[in-house]
Image (tube, coloured by chain):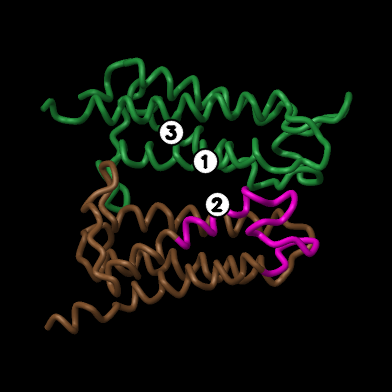
Amino acid sequence: MDEDKKQPTPGEWAIMGGGGVMLIGSFLDFSYGESALLGEGLFPVTTLMVLYGVVMALQVALTKFANVSLPDRVLSFTWEQVHLVLGVFAALMAVFWLVAAEDKGIGVFLVLLGAGAACAGAFIIQKERATGAIG
Amino acid sequence: MADSKVTPPVILILVGGGLVLIGSFLDFVSSGSFGVSAWDGDFVPFPVTIIPVLCGVAMAVHIGLTTFASVNLPDKVLGLGWIQIHLALAFQAVALMVTFLIVEKGGADIGIGLWLMLIASILLIVGAVMRERESAPAA
């Protein structure tokens, strides 16, 4: 039973995978050869969405694999709500950057893919954890 | 019940929402006599620059509708209460405006519009936090 609890759910895999893909993509060419993570003219605007994805992935990984105990709530938000908010905003920013970036590098698409996965994962865990947010 | 009162946080959010919209039409960045607004797709990363506008206007419209027009909206959206939605939108607006303030602008100066949008975003988050405090049960 305890082993089952330690196994990440599909939603949690999507969040961890999405955050990882965003982090990898942030090192690659985002626009005009500059990376999203530290690129001149991009940092820290493009870094913000990557940060959201990484925070989501870290929270899931730390609680699943490292048994780190985090507070139940952040301000008035449960962690499921935090994931939903960060996932939606990360995906929104990634889509808007797809429109805004004139010279789209592979980083734009990887960050978008990762943000989409993290956002989808945030919605899936609402169902998995029966938060009542959807369905 | 609190939604039907014009409280200080309500005013802050309405003013913040209005100012962020006005600021978006003023110079976001400028160089000499040349300036571009947050809506300019050639020199600033539009539409990323208008995310704070969308957040602020959404907050102000919600407050306006529930306070002055007595419009009934669902208590929750995706499991989030309206006070939480306001906190999230305001946080996103201010976080993005701070990053726009910091980002290297290639020699261009910070325009009055960017400053106004940043100040408006701060008003929005202050208003959102005050609403949260107002709604919290007394200890």
- Given the image, on which type of amino acid does mark 1 rest? Ala
- Given the image, on which type of amino acid does mark 3 rest? Met
Are the residues under marks 2 and 3 on the same chain? no
How many numbered marks have been drawn onto this rendered protein structure?
Answer: 3
Q: Which residues are magenta?
A: A28-54
> Could you say which quadrant of the image residue A120 lies in?
bottom left
Q: Is residue B15 magenta?
A: no
Whether pointer 2 and pointer 1 mark residues with C-beta atoms closer than 8 Å, the reply is: yes
Estimate the spatial distance between the alpha carbons at disc 2 and disc 1, rounded to whole Å: 8 Å
Q: Residue at x 61, y 69 (%)?
A: A25
Q: Which one is in front, A127 or A54?
A: A54
Q: Quadrant of the C terminus of chain A?
A: bottom left
Estimate the spatial distance between the alpha carbons at disc 1 and disc 3, rounded to whole Å: 16 Å
- Given the image, on which type of amino acid does mark 2 rest? Leu
Instruction: Give chain A's shade.
Output: brown
Q: Position of residue A102 (x, y in %)?
A: 78, 58
Which residue matches tag 2? A48
Q: Earlier in the sequence, mark 1 or mark 3?
A: 3
Which chain letter matches label 1? B
Mark number, residue B95: 1
Instruction: Give chain B's shade.
Output: green
Which element is circle 1 on? helix
Which element is circle 3 on? helix
Which residue matches tag 3? B59
Estimate the spatial distance between the alpha carbons at disc 2 and disc 3, rounded to whole Å: 21 Å
Which element is circle 2 on? helix
Q: Which one is in front, B11 or A27?
A: A27
Q: Position of residue A65 (x, y in %)?
A: 29, 75
Q: Residue at x 41, y 74 (%)?
A: A14
Which chain letter matches label 3? B
